[in-house]
Image: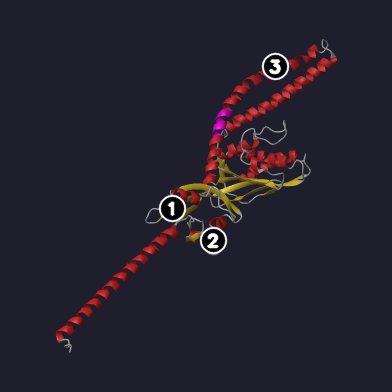
């Protein structure tokens, strides 16, 4: 017969159970504290991720999205993209991008950066995409982290800076070319006038037909020289656009005076209607009145050329862009500007007009005058629908 456990044995057994339960409670408390700490860190990381201004999806090697941050919904909207293919979500395409930065990052196991242009809604956006591999404990890539940064505005400013630098360089070259051309041109004009002045004295010594042909030739030489002098003057103005003293100017006054000068010109085109819509009162700007009138005159002539073969309307408007800026806009519903020419319209000598009907200096002078007045020029145009040129000035403080 087995002996019964003593009191000391029973107490020892219960004491052991009590120690086990205390140890278990301590482990549970530690696990609970670890869980709270992990949740706190998860929330902290999620707050950092949501604080990013870039779209940040995580995708599998096959291109399926496993998670996105808050910015995705602000940019793309809609429901959750988790489980869908990235190229269908972002580009509405049926096949992966070529080259695909995520695929390159996965295969090479390194960071890959690429720039892509595609549409988001109705807008075309420029994205800088950085693909970073997420590695397992063995160092092998298992997922890809994408950072999609919208750099559309930055690229637009870079293009404007490039244009400004190019115009500055061309301006320096133009000044030298203009001076070199001006000297022989002056001599040609002088000798042409001298020959024409002596023609009456030689009238009896020359055949009638020869004298008439010579007079016609002299007229052509002088007319073409006058045209060349206009181009030279345009080059000099382009290279030194800020020649006058800047004063406080009411933009509406400059527009009215310019439109009065245009009345005789517009009468030659009865199929064109000219409208003026001023905002009154308009804040003053600091400018050179003569140069502002020249700028508007060139924009009006450009608009008239766009309507030379069709009935249309030219609208001139002034207004306030925001609390700091005033704008002058010239709109026409003419032929518009094709996409491939849009980046060249401010280049000197660039023109789409037939030979002999344009020097290509009008819009380049407008750009130069705007730059001298710390103003910006904006262009909106669609082929067959017309164009609008908008000059935005800073108002006087």
Q: Is residue 229 visible?
A: yes
Q: Is residue 331 visible?
A: no
Q: On the image, which quarter does residue 195 sit in?
A: top right
Cα–Cα span, label 2 and label 3: 80 Å
Image depth: mark 2 or mark 3 in front: 2
Q: Are marks 2 and 1 in contact (CB under 8 Å)?
A: no
The residue wearing badge 2 is 84
The residue wearing badge 3 is 191
- Counting the numbered discs, the total is 3
Q: Position of residue 387 (x, y in %)?
A: 67, 46
Residue farthest toward the bottom in the current orientation of the protein: 1
The residue wearing badge 1 is 133
Q: Position of residue 170 (x, y in %)?
A: 57, 32
How is the rendered protein coloured? secondary structure
Q: Are marks 2 and 3 in contact (CB under 8 Å)?
A: no
Secondary structure type for disc 3: helix
Q: Is residue 241 left or right of residue 224?
A: left
221 shown above or below 116: above
Residue farthest toward the right in the current orientation of the protein: 208
260 shown above or below 220: below
Say few, some or many: other residues with alpha carbon within 10 Å of mark 3 (under 14 / 14 to 19 / 20 or more): few
Secondary structure type for disc 2: loop
Q: Nearer the viewer, residue 2 or 229?
A: 2
Cα–Cα span, label 1 and label 3: 77 Å
Magenta: main secondary structure equals: helix
Q: Nearer the viewer, residue 62 or 305?
A: 62
Q: Are marks 1 and 3 in contact (CB under 8 Å)?
A: no
What is the span of residues highlighted in magenta in the rendered image? Answer: 167-174
């Amino acid at each position: 017969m087995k002996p019964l456990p003593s009191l000391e044995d029973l107490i020892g057994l219960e004491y052991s159970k009590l120690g086990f339960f205390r140890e278990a409670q301590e482990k549970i408390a530690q696990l609970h504290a670890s869980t709270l700490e992990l949740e706190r860190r998860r929330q902290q990381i999620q707050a950092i991720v949501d604080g990013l201004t870039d779209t940040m999806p995580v995708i599998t090697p096959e291109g399926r999205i496993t998670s996105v941050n808050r910015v995705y919904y602000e940019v793309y909207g809609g429901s959750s993209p988790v489980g869908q293919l990235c190229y269908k979500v972002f580009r509405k395409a049926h096949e992966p991008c070529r080259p695909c930065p995520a695929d390159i990052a996965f295969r090479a196991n390194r960071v890959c950066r690429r720039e892509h242009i595609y549409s988001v809604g109705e807008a075309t956006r420029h994205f800088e995409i950085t693909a970073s591999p997420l590695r397992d404990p063995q160092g092998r890539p298992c997922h890809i982290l994408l950072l999609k940064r919208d750099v559309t505005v930055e690229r637009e400013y870079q293009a404007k800076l490039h244009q400004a630098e190019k115009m500055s360089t061309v301006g320096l070259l133009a000044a030298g070319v203009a001076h070199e051309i001006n000297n022989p041109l002056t001599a040609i004009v002088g000798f042409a006038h001298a020959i024409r002045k002596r023609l009456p004295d030689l009238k009896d010594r020359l055949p009638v037909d020869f004298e008439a042909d010579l007079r016609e030739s002299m007229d052509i030489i002088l007319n073409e020289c006058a045209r060349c002098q206009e181009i030279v003057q345009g080059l000099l103005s382009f290279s030194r656009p800020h020649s006058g003293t800047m004063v406080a100017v009411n933009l509406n006054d400059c527009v009215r005076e310019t439109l009065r000068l245009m009345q005789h010109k517009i009468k030659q085109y009865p199929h064109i209607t000219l409208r003026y819509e001023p905002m009154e009162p308009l804040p003053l700007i600091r400018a050179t009145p003569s140069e502002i009138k020249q700028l508007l005159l060139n924009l009006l002539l450009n608009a008239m050329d766009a309507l030379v073969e069709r009935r249309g309307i030219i609208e001139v408007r002034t207004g306030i862009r925001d609390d700091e800026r005033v704008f002058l806009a010239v709109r026409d519903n003419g032929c518009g500007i094709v996409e491939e020419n849009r980046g060249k319209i401010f280049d000197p000598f660039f023109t789409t007009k037939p030979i002999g009907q344009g020097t290509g200096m009008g819009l380049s002078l407008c750009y130069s005058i705007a730059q001298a007045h710390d103003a910006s020029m904006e262009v909106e145009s669609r082929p067959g629908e017309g164009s609008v040129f908008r000059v935005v000035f800073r108002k006087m403080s």
